[in-house]
Amino acid sequence: MTTRIIGTGSYVPEHIVTNDDLSKIVETSDDWIRSRSGIGERRIATDDRTSDMAAAAAARAIEQAGISPEEIDLILLATSSPDYCFPNGACEVQEKTGAVNAACYDISAACTGFVFALNTAHAFIRAGIYKTALVIGADVLSKLIDWTDRSTCVLFGDGAGAVVVRADETGVLGLNMHSNGQKGNVLTCGARSNGNFLLGKKPELGYMTMEGQEVFKFAVKKVPECIIQVLEETGTDKDDIDYYVIHQANYRIIESIAKRMKVSMDRFPANMEHYGNTSGASVPLLLDELNRSGKLKRGDKIILAGFGAGLTWGAALIEW
Ligand code: ACO
């Protein structure tokens, strides 16, 4: 018994911010951003909160799966930007979707969060504990960005993607998850002060910091490694993979991964041009786009792979 994706959904806020818009607030240009990252524009949440976007994506996935919300046993929300410390965002999604029978919690693994959450749902399903789960990646990173820092603010956008998974004969064929806390300092975001206000420490708001080149080197080394690991463990040839759905941080990272793996870029779909890096949302957002455009056929083999802060990275091989 394994875990099959039976419905996908996504949601992005309406408000579009182009590279030219950003060049009015920091010293940058459309040419610099496009050539270094492949990003042309991003969606920025004005009114939507993380849980609103997550619930909208989830509702579309539930509708496509053709199930009733009451059938969902588990909701996992991968996010680094929940609306509250508590209640968790998954509980908010439960409230908005009517999935009254689900156990709900969030998973924090930054841009790898969706892959980690899918793995967690798979573990419950494989163990026979749950039958149906809703797995969501959603982030409003625009809340966590220092909009005066041109080295980070041009890269990110807001959005959500979701899948409904169910116990089935085929689906997830293999997956892995990895972490390296020793390198956590290369990509950080302090949420609130670590000091205790009672003891006279001033609360501080933290924003994202990133050593871009370190993250780049990490991604182009570790992502091919974890993909090859899952291919080897399942006895699958890299050329039998129909699509490599990789976290959409940077087009040059995807090109390097394809080159290292000696796989044509045709197998690496990309949408960061329109959405930027949507963190936990990026993998399910792209998967939903492929699914709704009719590109996925029953039996297709798809790699899902993420990498991000922690550091964390991981890959899943699924049969559609
Ligand atoms: N516009 C114009 N110039 C800029 C900008 C900008 N937005 N940002 C930086 N620069 C300047 C720098 O100040 C530097 O100028 P200097 O040479 O005068 O000092 C110059 O451009 C080159 O800067 P680098 O950082 O060396 O540029 P690089 O080629 O490494 O590209 C980038 C930067 C795009 C961030 C790249 O390192 C990268 O993609 N790294 C991976 C980042 C990533 O993927 N992060 C997210 C993954 S994890 C997650 O998703 C949370």
Image (cartoon, grey):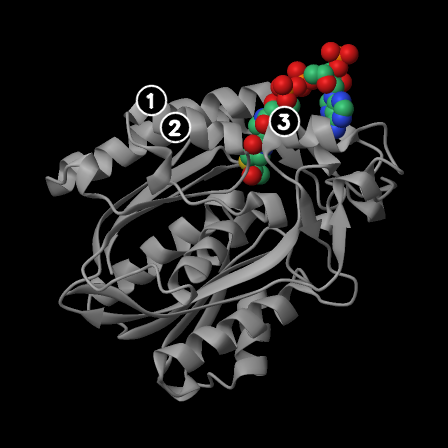
Is residue 87 visible to the viewer in this orientation of the structure? no
* Residue type for callout 3: Ser
Residue 232 drawn above or below residue 128:
above
Where ligand 1 lies, by quadrant? Answer: top right
* CB-based contact (under 8 Å), mark 3 and mark 1: no
Quarter in which the C terminus is drawn: bottom left
Residue appearing at x 63%, y 39% in the figure = 39
Dot label at residue 260: 1
Q: Position of residue 110 (x, y in %)?
A: 54, 45
Q: Residue at x 15, y 34 (%)?
A: 232
Q: Which mark is residue 257?
A: 2
Placement of 240 over or under 213, stated as above or below: below
**Residue beneath label 3, please?**
35
Mark 1, secondary structure of its residue: helix
Callouts 1 and 2 close, C-beta under 8 Å: yes
Which of label 2 and label 3 is nearer to you? 3
The answer to whether residue 49 is left or right of residue 53 is right
Tag 1: Cα neighbours inside 10 Å, few (<14), some, or many (≥20)?
Answer: few
